Image (cartoon, grey):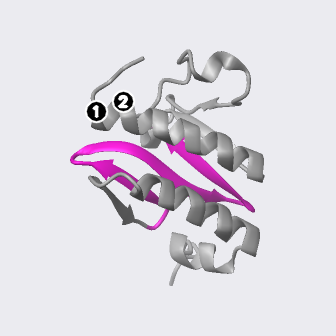
Amino acid sequence: MLKYARRASFASRLEKADAQTKEYFEELNQEFLSYASVKARTSLRCVTYRHGSEIIGKIALGGKSLKLYLAIDPKAKMLEEGKYHPRNMSRTLAYKDVPTMLPIKSELAVRKAKVAIQYAAIRIIYKFDT
């Protein structure tokens, strides 16, 4: 006898999501995979993007919106400009490697997220810190 209902996989939840959410996910997925050395792995909860053994970011679904987790310090100078609204997730053990969360609910948020992904990828892949 099961006490708890099984959690739906990320793939099945994305399949059930609306067309706009799927489009946002595809744009962010292509941004991560545009770097030759970045690999994606889909798990029950999210899609994780890595360069070797280092995590660059994760994309998860929360309700009707996407959540982008990046390996950037939430207090980084780039994020303090005011155009980003990051949430600090560093206290949660599951997100200690990707402490910055950006909610993706609009086309503008996707455009901002692409810039943040580029920033994170440059830091991890090219070992360049600004």
Disc 1 designates what residue?
A: 126
Q: Nearer the viewer, residue 11 or 29?
A: 29
Tell me the residue at 52%/75% (across/down): 11
Q: Are marks 2 and 1 in contact (CB under 8 Å)?
A: yes
Whether residue 70 sits left or right of residue 20 in the image: it is left
Tell me the residue at 64%/31% (across/down): 87
Secondary structure mainly formed by the magenta segment: strand
Indicate yes or no whether the magenta region holds residue 48: yes
Q: Which residues are magenta?
A: 44-71
Residue 124: x and y in percent read: 32, 34
Which dot marks residue 123?
Answer: 2
Residue 64: x and y in percent read: 75, 62
Quarter residue 122 falls in: top left
Residue 115: x and y in percent read: 57, 38
Q: Nearer the viewer, residue 123 or 9?
A: 123
Amino acid at the residue labelled 2: Arg
Amino acid at the residue labelled 1: Tyr
